[in-house]
Image (cartoon, helix red, strand yellow):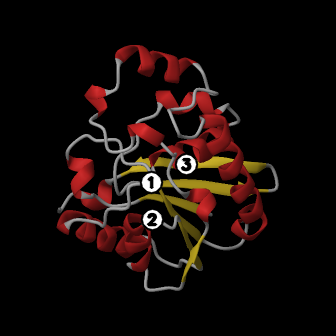
């Protein structure tokens, strides 16, 4: 089983800013969220994480060695990184949502993100048939992983909402990947 975990909250998340490669740590709430995630996912055999600190801090809560895989890093928003979402021009959002090859200035396209995430997932498939692997990542790579799972292109990511500190489950069988759960935040009810 693959468990896709979105990292816990950071101070920049709270402000509705685009947080791509900006490397902010978890805030107090985010640290509590990480503990709650680790407490509900039992029998974890392996933990893989994006290299960004908000992801590695979330991954550390499992108390297992953390393998860093840069292919699970957040989308590079380029010049938009750190901008308030409302400050990105409406026409830019429209173009971005309808063109998977749209590149923010000095950033990365969804196609580029999708290629690296699919490559990383394909390397985990065989092991995930018999082991429980946690991948701690970010909103865009996890959405790309869901698109891979359900057999759609990365453009479908715009039709998914994914909460911070959520868990999505992908079961791997001889027939390939199947969704077992998406955007589960039930473990956060006490926070």
Residue 92 position within the rendered picture, expressed as x and y whole percent measured from the top left: 44, 20
Q: Is label 3 or label 1 in front?
A: 1
Q: Label for residue 52?
A: 2
Query: Few, some or many C-alpha atoms within 10 Å of disc 2 (few <14, some 14-19, many ≥20)?
Result: many
**Is the residue 16 above or below the residue 12 in the image?**
above
User: Of residues 115 and 23, which is closer to you in this image?
Assistant: 23
**Is the residue 152 above or below the residue 54 in the image?**
above
Residue 137 position within the rendered picture, expressed as x and y whole percent measured from the top left: 49, 58
Q: What element carries label 1?
A: loop
The quadrant of the picture occupied by the C terminus is: bottom left
Q: Is mark 3 on a helix, strand or loop?
A: helix
**Is the residue 90 above or below the residue 35 in the image?**
above
Q: What element carries label 2?
A: loop
How many numbered markers are drawn? 3
Q: Distance between the residues labelled 3 and 1?
A: 13 Å
Q: Distance between the residues labelled 3 and 2?
A: 13 Å
Residue 7 position within the rendered picture, expressed as x and y whole percent measured from the top left: 39, 60
Q: Label for residue 21?
A: 1
Q: Which of marks 3 and 2 is nearer the N terminus?
A: 2
In the image, farthest residue toward the right: 174
Query: Few, some or many C-alpha atoms within 10 Å of disc 3 (few <14, some 14-19, many ≥20)?
Result: many
Residue labelled with disc 3: 141
What residue sits 64% from the left and 27% below the top? Answer: 101
- State left or right for residue 126 relative to residue 108: right
User: Of residues 5 and 77, which is closer to you in this image?
Assistant: 77
Asked if marks 2 and 1 touch (Cβ < 8 Å), the reply is yes
């Amino acid at each position: 089983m693959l468990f896709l975990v979105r990292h816990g909250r950071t101070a920049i998340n709270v402000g509705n800013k685009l947080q791509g490669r900006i490397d902010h740590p978890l805030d107090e709430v985010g640290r509590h969220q990480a503990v709650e995630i680790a407490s509900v996912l039992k029998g974890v055999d392996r933990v893989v994480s994006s290299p960004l600190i908000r992801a590695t801090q979330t991954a550390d809560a499992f108390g297992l060695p953390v393998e860093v895989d840069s292919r699970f890093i957040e989308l590079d928003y380029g010049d938009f990184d750190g901008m308030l979402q409302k400050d990105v021009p409406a026409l830019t959002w429209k173009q971005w949502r309808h063109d998977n090859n749209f590149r923010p200035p000095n950033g990365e396209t969804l196609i580029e993100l999708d290629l690296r995430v699919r490559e990383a997932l394909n390397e985990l498939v065989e092991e995930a048939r018999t082991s429980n692997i946690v991948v701690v990542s970010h909103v865009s790579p996890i959405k790309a992983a869901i698109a891979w799972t359900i057999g759609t292109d990365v453009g479908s990511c715009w039709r998914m909402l994914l909460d911070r500190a959520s868990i999505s489950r992908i079961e791997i069988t001889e027939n390939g990947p199947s969704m077992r759960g998406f955007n589960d935040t039930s473990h956060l009810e006490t926070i």
